[in-house]
Amino acid sequence: MLSIATLGARDHKVLMRATKVSKVYGSGQRLHYGVKETDLNIYAGDFTVIMGPSGSGKSTLLHLLSGLDRVTTGELYFKGQRIDQRSEKELGQFRSRKMGCVYQAFHLVPDLTILENILFPAYIAGMRKEAAEKKAHACMVELGIIGLQHRYPSQVSGGQQQRTAIARALINSPEILFADEPTGALSQEQGTRILDIFTDLNQQGQSIVMVTHDAKAACRANRLLVVKDGMVDQIVGLGKYEANEQQKREADILSILASSSQKRCT
Ligand SMILES: Nc1ncnc2c1ncn2[C@@H]1O[C@H](COP(=O)(O)OP(=O)(O)OP(=O)(O)O)[C@@H](O)[C@H]1O
């Protein structure tokens, strides 16, 4: 059942908080907002999905939250600690320990094997070889890519490449997993497998924030942020995902998106 989620009325913890966050591109007369004075909370254990029209600011918002890009103004907090003012080096270290990212383009290093790609962030974060290899093995088992460790990215399917990218994002046990259109480059079958993996991870407690255009993919989330003209236009609680409610959830999400596109955003 859908309900408007009121900020602060939830019984679980705020993992990330954005306060009046903006991202401005260009300068002078060419200045424009990617994200405009946005306030929002991301809650621990939630599967949050960000939707909205093309150019509305979804990826920019995700990049700001994940520290891939810097806010122009505003404040970002992770478990109550301000993170937007950290130096590049500090933020890089923080991100490698606390955050994992998966993108539509898998961004695997072609000259590294599947195993080496997965291990890479563990070494950056300073994990010991033995512990890193043990964790990589566990991630590969979890994601069903065990046996592929000595192949190169060009020698596995698109779905297997994306699962490698997810394993790489999970190797440092991130507190939050960000995903930008993670199924966009995959067949429907491969995309469904990735969404099943996200659903399982979330049911094990993994916090996830995902950008998608696809209402089918968005059904997996329990919280929907609709972005419009660089601002959060609606925040809707979707309830726990149940596979047998897929069609109804999809219809509900499409109707929320339609109502958002009809409203004028001031
Ligand atoms: N590096 C950049 N330089 C200048 N403008 C940018 C840059 N990145 C994004 N923008 C602009 O910021 C706005 C938001 O872009 P963003 O990519 O976040 O939208 P989106 O909702 O993710 O779009 P899509 O669904 O098409 O991927 C757009 O007007 C876009 O043109």
Image (tube, rainbow, N blue to C red):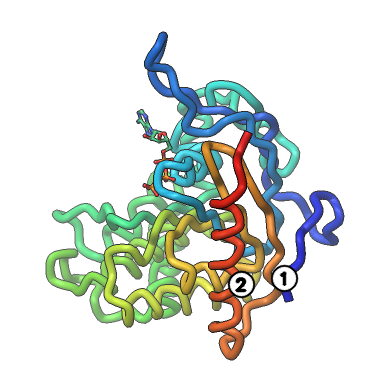
Q: Is residue 97 left or right of residue 146?
A: right
- Residue 179: x and y in percent read 45, 56
Q: Nearer the viewer, residue 158 or 252?
A: 252
Picture quadrant of residue 49: bottom right
- Residue designated by label 2: 252
Answer left or right for 121 relative to 235.
left
Residue farthest along the bottom direction in this orientation: 244
How many numbered marks are there?
Answer: 2
Q: Marks 2/1: CA distance? A: 8 Å
Q: Quadrant of ligand 1?
A: top left
Q: Of the residues shown, which amino acid type is indicated by label 2?
A: Asp
User: N-terminal of the two: label 2 or label 1?
Assistant: 1
- Residue 94, relative to residue 14: is it above or below? above
Q: Is residue 26 left or right of residue 178?
A: left
Determine which residue is flagged by label 1: 2
Q: Amino acid at mark 1?
A: Leu
Kindly tell me whether residue 94 is visible in this rendering: no
Residue at point 20%, 63% (across, down): 113
Q: Residue at x 63, y 29 (%)?
A: 37
Residue 262 position, x and y percent, is 57, 51
The residue under the point 66% across, 51% down is 234
Q: Is residue 11 visible?
A: yes
**Camera-side residue of 264 and 88:** 264
Image coordinates for residue 143, horizontal then vertical, percent: 40, 76
> What quarter of the picture does the C terminus occupy?
top right
The image shows residue 28, relative to residue 72, as above or below, that is: above
What residue do we see at 81% from left, 54% from top?
Answer: 6
